[in-house]
Image (tube, grey):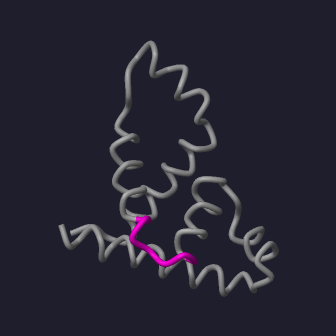
């Protein structure tokens, strides 16, 4: 059973990957793929089943690396609202992965 803490750790690792995607691309040619690619595939497959808002939040926070505050400002929402949406996103992933 996957916990919310594990999902948050995975999402932070995904954010790190996308922030350093070029370095990973270079390393793949010499070292090979690392385990993050399995996580990327799993999370990207799951997010395609999410609502449009959750999909957009995932892209903003974890693919583009925006902060919750920046997303709140861009979306003209409160930081608390974005925090609540992120919590719901983590719960969505938990439900999806615990179905398996």
Q: Residue at x 58, y 57 (%)?
A: 62
User: 67 or 74: which is nearer to us?
Assistant: 74
> Does residue 24 appear left or right of residue 92 in this picture?
right
The relative height of residue 5 versus residue 64 in the rendered view (above or below) is below
The image shows residue 85 at horizontal and vertical percentages of 57, 81
Quadrant of the snapshot with the N terminus: bottom left
Q: Residue at x 75, y 77 (%)?
A: 72
Task: Report the magenta residues as a range.
Answer: 47-53
The image shows residue 52 at horizontal and vertical percentages of 54, 75
User: 72 or 4: which is nearer to us?
Assistant: 72
The image quarter in which residue 93 lies = bottom left
| Residue closest to the far left | 100
The image shows residue 69 at horizontal and vertical percentages of 75, 72
The image shows residue 66 at horizontal and vertical percentages of 70, 60
Q: Residue at x 38, y 28 (%)?
A: 33
Q: Residue at x 75, y 86 (%)?
A: 78
The relative height of residue 23 versus residue 85 in the rendered view (above or below) is above
Quadrant of the snapshot with the C terminus: bottom left
| Residue 48 part of the magenta-drawn span | yes
């Amino acid at each position: 059973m996957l916990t919310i803490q594990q999902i948050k750790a995975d999402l932070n690792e995904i954010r790190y990957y996308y922030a350093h995607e070029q370095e990973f691309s270079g390393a793949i040619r010499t070292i090979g793929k690392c385990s993050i690619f399995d996580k990327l595939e799993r999370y990207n497959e799951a997010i395609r089943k999410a609502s449009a808002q959750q999909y957009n939040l995932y892209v903003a926070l974890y693919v583009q690396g925006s902060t919750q505050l920046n997303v709140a400002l861009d979306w003209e929402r409160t930081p608390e609202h974005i925090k609540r949406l992120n919590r719901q996103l983590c719960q969505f992933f938990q439900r999806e992965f615990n179905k398996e």
